[in-house]
Structure formats: structure tokens, C-alpha cells
Image: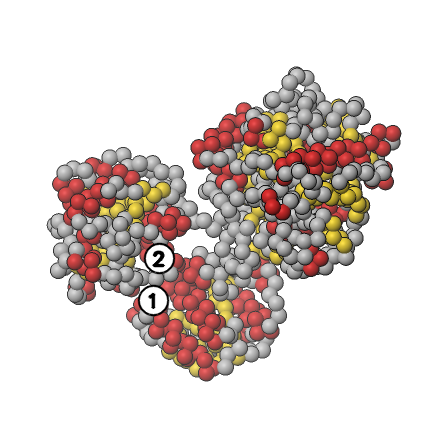
Amino acid sequence: MLAKEIERAGIPTAFVTALPTIATMIGANRIVRGPAITHPFGLEEAQRRRIVERALEMLETPVEAPTVWEVPA
Amino acid sequence: MRRRGRLGFRAAGSSEGGLTAWELASFPPELLGELPAREGVDVEIVRPGEPVRITHVLDAVEPRVRPDGRAAFPTEGRAGEGRTNRLEGVTVLSCLDFPAEERPLHEQEALVDIAGPGAALTPFSETTNVVLTFRARDGLGNEELEDWARRETLAVAEELARPTLAAEPVDVERFELEPADEGLPAVVALVQLSDLGPLYYQYVYGVPAGRAGLPRPIDPAELLDGAVTCGEYHWAALRNPTVFFQRNRLVRALYREHDRRLRFVGVVLMRGYEQSAEDKQRAADRAAEAVVGLGAAGAVITTDAGGNSHTDVMLTCRACERAGVSTTVIVAEMADPGSATPGLTDWVPEADSIVSAGNAEELVDAWMPERVLGGDTLLDGAPARDSGRIPVRNYLGATNQMGQLSLVGTAW
Amino acid sequence: MRVVHYVNQFFAGLGSEEAAETPPTRIEGAVGPGRGLESAFADGDIVATLSCGDDYFGEHEQEALARLVELLEPEGADVLVCGPAFGSGRYGYACAQFSRIASERLGIPTLAAMHDENPGVAAAEGRVLIVPTAVNVAGMRDALPGMARLAEALVSGRELGPPAEEGYLPRGFRRNAFAEKPGAERAIDLLLGKLAGETSSEVASGFDRVQPPAPVEDLGDALVALVTEAGCVPQGNPDRLPSIRAQGWLRYPLLDEQRLAPERYESVHGGFDVSLANEDPNRLVPLDTVRELERAGRIGRVHDAFYTTTGNGTPVAAATRFGREIAGELRDAGVQAVLLSGT
């Protein structure tokens, strides 16, 4: 999957998805749970901002293995 | 007299300084004494090649006795010094069908086939087996029954070896590690012992692994001389019965290779089934520290049983590699034979050197024994005499992860 | 033995990249490497050669497969042989898929041949017998006899032996055997080998775990790119923009755009209801938020292009190839972090 190939090239990648279980299984390392398949980055701007900021936080955080972060409501 | 590897120092964790040696004297199976009579226990002999299936097996123990009168399976003092006698070619197998209403939580069937397609999966098809079938007793729950069965089995194993005290050995092996060529790589055996609660303990001097101060180094000879015994009854093929410690091929091979291809610098025991992610990581880190403390450049890491004990092993592998110790890990595979999905329960990228103990999910062709000991019905309700194909997973020690046997998974 | 041989447009002599869009076609008898293959059989004839352009197959996989099966059926073939594709990913992928589908739909034995790292191997998912070859056409002469032997073995109906013996790639199944030495001794050998610099293993994990890249120290200095698997593409005619449609992914310039305007972008992903995304494409590719953060200094700079894969149900091997291509471009552009949206 895309996330792993980009990570394999050494670029930290935050993968925002409504299916974090599958993402974990396949082995993406930095995963943020998005609200829905139809709109992983949220419906409204405020929600989108929270999701993006969480993803940015994760990009600045070391991880050891596939890790899923939730977005605070 | 055969000579073995020689060592000049004591492994950390021993009580006194100075050189130690341990001698293991082997005696022929013909010395097997009279079969013991025990109330509540059926005792039978099964010889190699007999068309017998033994079910509900708890443990396999080699008869041992010490000429100096100390216990063969000590709960105090120290094993691995002085001399111990063994009866070659004889195994004591204990069987128990736990009471139906109160079955153990993780219980799984354990079989030994003395003939047929399953015979090659365990070494017990080639020894003379003294089979002790313990019968449930009113008023005794599972843990009390197990305690009785285990103590009795070890006592019988000691009793059966008594005739050796008046006989001459056919062989004496001396286990002693003398100073070796410093240019050879230092290697440790890092051995995992389970503790998942009652009925799932491996014991160190009679203490469950979780309370035995693990991880810690021991003298390799202690492992070979009855310090570690088995009290776990899940994962038949993946667990390590007592005899696999008594006859431990890894430790014996490391003694043999000492001052030849490597320096054998010790054994570290660690616990499998630590109960939280933090505990697992902490134990892995401490095991790696213990290995580093022995001066090892490399470690062979063994596994006990299945499920999340594999996570402990993989975390330990990673911790060792990060501490600069190269590792080779021995694990069993759980691969669906009909599909191309890999069968490692857990894995870390640092586990790049793995010995396969075989695929426990493979099915063994159906076989109908002429006689069944232990119990006539398997745990899943099938008749033991006619149960159809059985997974390798159910054969005692068949995919043990200390490298005792030669079953291996191959790529197809 | 009646054999049908599948090759791509190049090996069928139909042309090179310019013929990559050729739809499935049938040629009488053996063509190109098929002649060498035919002479390697003890007693077999290539009754027909089927061919398809690599790009056509990639873009119209279901139609291509249906048509190829249609062309194959009346030939009365005892076996279908595909390739050798060597290292060519699109060709190897087609060989793997056609082998698999032909076997499933017509019940005839099939085999393919390609380099062991060809994405077609992963695409086969263990369901196709694949003869390993060299990475390029220099290995043609060496590849053909092995293909012929395996084809004959399949037609004979006998049970196949282990991969090393029969000359095919292990398919991911595991079978027990008894080794010459017990595991303990093998472990010591492996460990000493590893300490001497040669690491090997009896089990491949199958878990293709990637080491997580180190975090970005401060995104305020970083170049951040947006990527999506959700098929977000410009509305209307994409051909006027530099698209690489055949590769299954697209790159679009962002220039001065501060958000993805709904009248300019849409999602063509077939796997989910795209109406919400079409109302506001920023729900898939959060350009609006990311620009805000760029203005606020939280992010250094937004990369001047975003990437999107197209279509759903992309098989693993193809997705891997697309991913590597995109990753390569991002790395070459100096991108330091990526926000990726999945479906």
C-alpha cells in the first residue's frame, strides 16, 4: 500500500483512514483514525483542522510499530 | 569414558567460586526396575513400535537418580554438580483426564503415537515407556490432581532409576567448561519458560517461572540436571516436557562446540507470557542485559508453547539485537496448510535468523491404534481409536521450540 | 501436447511501447520466443499465440481477461504458458492474472515465467506456478527449457515435487519435512553464520514490515506533500494536464490554489459513495486546512503537486509498483513528510 512504500523511501507518512484495523494489519506505521470512508478528513473545517493537526503531531512523534491515534472530538 | 566440552569458570548466578563439573552416567534400559504400584494410578509398559496411542499426556520424564542421595529433581540446593545417573532409552509418560465439569482454561489434547504416521513426530515412539494414567479422585479439583500427578511422576522417575546405583555405567559424560580460545564468539542459550498461571507453569527448582526471579543466568548443567520441570498442559506440540530439558540438545551441543567453534558462556532463563505490554518489554530488556552481562556476542533464543509467548520471544530478540547481541530464534509455525499465508504468530524485523520447528497446523493421516492408554475419548469428543486426521499441534513436543527434534517447515 | 502461448505486444512482434495499447489478439502457431519454447518440448506444439498490449491489459483488465479466455477456449489446449516476462512488471502482472483466471475459468493447467521480484509474483498470491527467470531478455535461452519441463509435468497429471526440484517459485505454502540435523544444531549453525556476516532464515515472516521513518523535528521547516488513494482527480478532461494514466496514478499541480474547489475536482474512485467528496474535495485532500497551517507557519511549505491513485481494487503488486513510483518522485522533490488519505 502507498503508506508503506512512501515510508520505505524514508519519508514519515501520516495515514488518515476510517479503517485503521486494516491499515495496522498491512503495516502502515503512523495511522490516524478518520471519521468515515466517504470523508477521511472530516466533513467540516473545524473537524478537518483537528484531524490534520493530529496527523502533524504524529509526524513529529517517534513510533516503533503500526500505531493508531484517535482524534479528540 | 567419553569427554565433553570443558569450561573454566562458573556462570553468573552460582553460589560458590571455583571450577565445577557435572557428570551424567548412562545405564542401559534393561536395568529398568519393577513397575511401581500406586493407588489411583494405572501403570503399563509400552515398547517401541507397539500399535498404541497414548492420550491426555501431561509430561515425559527420563528416569534419574543421584548416587549421593540428593534429589534428582531438587527444590533446594543446586543441580548440575557431582554425578547423576540416567536410565537410557526409558521414558515415564504421565496421563490425566481432568474432571469434566472443571476443565482447565487453555486445555488442549496431547498425544503420543508409538506406531503409525504420528510415531515419527515424537521421540517417545523409540523409548520404552512407563505410562502412568492418573485417575480422577473425588474431592480433588484440577490443581490438586495435577499437583499429585506431577509429584508422583517425578517420584516414579527417580524410583525407576534406582537399580543403576548398584550397576556400572555404559558411558559417563563430563560437563565442564574450561577456558577457551578468546577469539571464538561467545554464545548464550536464552531459554523461555512459560507461566500462564496454575496448570501452565514451568518450574525452576519447583518454583513457577513467574516467581523464580527471571530473567536470570544459570549454570547450563543445572538445566540438564533436573532444575527445570514441566507443569504446563496446553499447546502439546509447542510445549517442552521435562525430558526436553534433561536431554536438552541445544545446551549439549553448545558444550560440544565449546572451544571449537564458539565459547559457551552460559544459559539465561526468561519467562514467557508476561502479562502486560510493559512487563513484556521490561522482561525482554532485562533478558538482553543478562545476556550482555555474560559477555555474549550471540544468543540462541528458544520459545515455549504458543500464542503470546511468541510476542515475548520476538521482543526479546529485538532487545538483544539492539543491545548488540546477534540472535537466532527457534519458533514453530502455525501456517494454514491449504493457503499461502505465512504462519508466524508474531515477528519483528530484527528476527532475520529463524529456525523453524515445523508447521504445527499440518494434518497427520488417520491411524487406528490397537490399544489406547490415557483415555478412550479425545478432548474434542472423537474416539481415540478412530479420530481421523489429527493436527501435528496435538502431538507432545512435536514442534518444540528448543530444537530437540528435526521437524522443519519447507517452502512449497 | 497442445500448447497455447501468451506473450505481450513486443514479443509478439506487434511493436514496442507504441503498441502497448493493442487489445487481445490471436496469432496462428508460435511467434518469437514461442519458437524456442516449442522446440524445447519433447512432443508438443504451440497451436496458437495470444497477445495483449501491456497497457491495454493494465487499463482494461477485466475486458482483456474475458477476451483472452474467449480466445483460449476453442483451442483445446492441454496447457497455457505465459511469458517469460523477466523483470517487466506490466507484462509479468498480465501473465500472472491470465494464468490464474484461465485456470479458474477453463480448468486447464497454466504456468507463467518471470523474475522472482516481478510484481506479477505477488499478484499471483501463490495461485500460479511461476518459473523463475533472469531479470532481462538475456535470460531467454535459460528460461525456456524449465518452462517446457514444467508444462510437460503439468500435462502428465503427476503430483509435483518440491519447488526446487521442479523449477518453480515456492508459492507460500509450508510443508513439514525432517531435516538432517535437529533444530538446536541448525540454530547454532545459523547463529555462527550470522556472526560471520551471513544471515539466513528458515522462515520468511511474510509480514512486510517497514521500519517507521524518524519523525520530523519541526514541521515548520518542512516540505509536506498531500497524497490520496481516494481517486481525487480534476473534473472533466484530464488529458490537458500532465497525467500518467497508464500507471494507475496521477500527479496534479497545486500552484496557488488555497483549496480544492468542488467545481474543479471530483473523485473517480469506484469503491465508495463519492457524493460527499465531490461536494467538497477537501474532505479527501485537505488542502484548505493545510494552506491555513502553512500561512500560520505550522507547516513550512506545501508541495506544489498532489498525487492520487485511480480506481479501486488495485491488486497488491500494482499498488506496490505505483507506491514506489510516487515515493521516488516525492523523495526526488525533497518532500519531508506526507499526509495520506485512504478510503
Give the residue drawn at x 60%, y 46%. B101
Look at label 1 and name its amino acid.
Gly
Looking at the rendering, in which quadrant would you find the N terminus of chain C? bottom right
Residue on which the image places disc 2 = C319
Residue C126's x, y, as percent? 49, 61
Q: Secondary structure at mark 1?
A: helix
For mark 1, name the chain.
C
In the rendered image, the vertical position of residue B165 relative to residue C71, given as above or below: above
Q: Secondary structure at mark 2?
A: helix
Is residue C323 something that shows in the picture? yes
Residue B112's x, y, as percent? 70, 49
Near-viewer residue (C148 or B395) = B395
Give the residue drawn at x 49%, y 55%. B341
Looking at the rendering, in which quadrant would you find the C terminus of chain C? bottom left
Q: Which callout, 2 or 1, points at the residue further toward the start of the chain? A: 1
Residue A50's x, y, as percent? 21, 42
Question: Label 1: few (<14), some or many (≥20) within 10 Å?
Answer: many
In this rendering, would B224 be left or right of B280? right
Q: Which mark is residue B166?
A: none
In this rendering, would C3 be left or right of C15? right
Question: Label 2: few (<14), some or many (≥20) within 10 Å?
Answer: many
Give the residue drawn at x 27%, y 34%. C217
Residue on which the image places disc 1 = C58
Is residue B263 something that shows in the picture? no
For mark 2, name the chain.
C
Give the residue drawn at x 66%, y 16%. B17
Look at label 2 and name its amino acid.
Ala
Residue contact at pointers 2 and 1, CB within 8 angstroms:
no
